[in-house]
Image (spheres, rainbow, N blue to C red):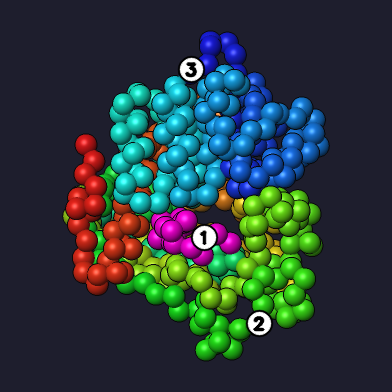
Amino acid sequence: MSPQPGRPARYAVVGTGARAEMFVRALVRDHADTAELVAFADVNQARMDAHNRWLAELGHPRVPTYHAGDFTAMLAKERVDVVLVTSVDVTHDEYVVAALDAGCDVVTEKPMTTDTRRCQRILDAVRRTGRRVTVAFNYRYNPLHEQLRRLLADGAVGEIGSVHFEWLLDVRHGADYFRRWHRDKASSGGLMVHKASHHFDLVNWWLSATPVQVYAAGRLFFYGENGLRHGYARDYDRAHASPDAADDPFALHLAEHPRLRELYLDAESADGYHRDRNVFAPGVSIEDDMAVLATYSTGATMTYHLTAYAPWEGYRVMVNGSRGRLELEVSESEYVSPAAAGALKGAALHGDQAAAEGGSATLTLRPFWSPPRRIEVDGYTRHGHGGADARMTQVIFGGVPDPLHRAASARDGALALLTGLAANRSFDTGAPVRVADLLTLD
C-alpha cells in the first residue's frame, strides 16, 4: 500500500525488543507529521504491552497489538503502508517478504537477513512486487563517515589502493552479544553478519565498489567455555537470582534496569527467553576474534579485524591512495570501569547514550609532500551513534532530502551481507571465497 497524498504514512513495527525503541520514539516524537505508528506485532504480548506503556509516557495513544502469526492480517486490518522490522535477524525475511507481497514498503534493521537463501527471497520479492526495502545502516549517517565519503569522492587521497579497518567492542558491549540470542549463529549469522555488516556496508559506500573475494580466519577465543582457561568462568547459566553472578563483572542484572526488566525479565513466562545468559556458559556458536582480507571491484583491498573482548571501544579506519592517506580514529570509551562493567552501552536504548568513560574522534588527512591536516567535522556527537540515529530517521521517516543518497537499498543490504557470509564460509573452509559463488546480483 502507498500512503495517500497529504496524510502520514502508516507504520507497523514487528519485533518489540530493545532494538525497536529508538525507531518507535522517532516515529511518535520526532516525525508525527509524516509518519503514524498504527500497530505492534511480536511473539510476546508482554513486550508489546511494555512498548504501549512507554507510548503513553510520550503522550501517544496505545496501538493495537498482534501476535506475529497474525502479521499478514494486521497489515490489511490496520491499512499499513510501511513495516518496520526489528525482530530476531533470522526472521527478517519472513516479515519482509510478507510485507512486500501485501503491497507495503519495508524498513528493516541490519543485517537484512542471515544467509544467501533468505537474501535471495528478499531480492526476488523486491523484483516481483516493485516495492522498496530500506536497510537501517545508520552508520552511513554519522557525520564523520559522511565527511570521509566526501573526501574520498573529491579525490583527497587520489585512487584508493587499500583500506585497513579495525573495530573493537569492549568487554561491556562485546560481552552482551554472548548473553542473548546473538550467541547462536543460526539466529544471528555471527558477528560477521550481525555486527560487521554495518562496517562492510560503509566500505562498499566509501569506495563506491562491490566485494569480489574474501579470505578470513575467525575463532571463539575469549567467551564461551574459554572462560575456564582465562580464569573468568562462573558456575551459573543465567544471572538472575544466581549467587555466583552477584559480583561477576560480565553478568547483566536485568532487575536493575527498568526498561530491560519490563522487556525481558517480566516477559519470560510468554516465551522462555533469557536475556542474561552467562557469557562463559556452553552453547556459544559465534566467533569473537575475526580477521578478513577482501578485494573489491575497483581493485582495492581491505584488511578488517573485529575483536569482541577489548579493554576499550572504538575503531580505526585508514585509507591509502595514490595522493596520500586518510585516517579516522574514534574512541567511544577509553576503558570499562568496574562499576559499569555489568551495565549496557546506552542502557536499553541501543546506542542512544554515550559510554561514561571518555571518548574522542579525529579525522586526519595526510597528503604527500605536506604536513598532516586535521579535518573538523560539524554535527558529530557522542550520543545516538555519533548523531547518526536522528539523521537517519529524518531521511527515512521525515522525508528530508538526501543529497548523499545514504538510504541503503535491498541490494546494498545484500552486498554488506555477502562479505560477512563469504567470511563465515572462509572460516569453515580455510580458503578464499568468491562472492559471486554465493549469490549473483544483477
Magenta segment main secondary structure: helix
Query: Looking at the image, can residue 216 be seen?
Result: yes
Q: Is residue 223 above or below residue 254?
A: below
Distance CA(mark 2)–CA(mark 3): 54 Å
Residue at image location 69% in from the left, 42% down from the top? 45
Residue type at mark 2?
Answer: Asp
Q: Are marks 1 and 3 in contact (CB under 8 Å)?
A: no
Q: Earlier in the sequence, mark 2 or mark 1?
A: 1
Q: Looking at the image, is mark 1 or mark 3 nearer the viewer?
A: 1
Magenta residues?
Answer: 180-195
| Residue placed under numbered mark 2 in the picture | 235
Q: Are marks 2 and 3 in contact (CB under 8 Å)?
A: no
Can you give x and y, in whole percent of width and height, for residue 9 in the image? 57, 21
Residue at image location 66% in from the left, 65% down from the top? 276
Q: Earlier in the sequence, mark 1 or mark 3?
A: 3
| Residue placed under numbered mark 1 in the picture | 182
Residue at image location 67% in from the left, 32% down from the top? 65
Q: Looking at the image, is mark 2 or mark 1 nearer the viewer?
A: 2
Q: Is residue 423 magenta?
A: no
What number is the disc on residue 2?
3
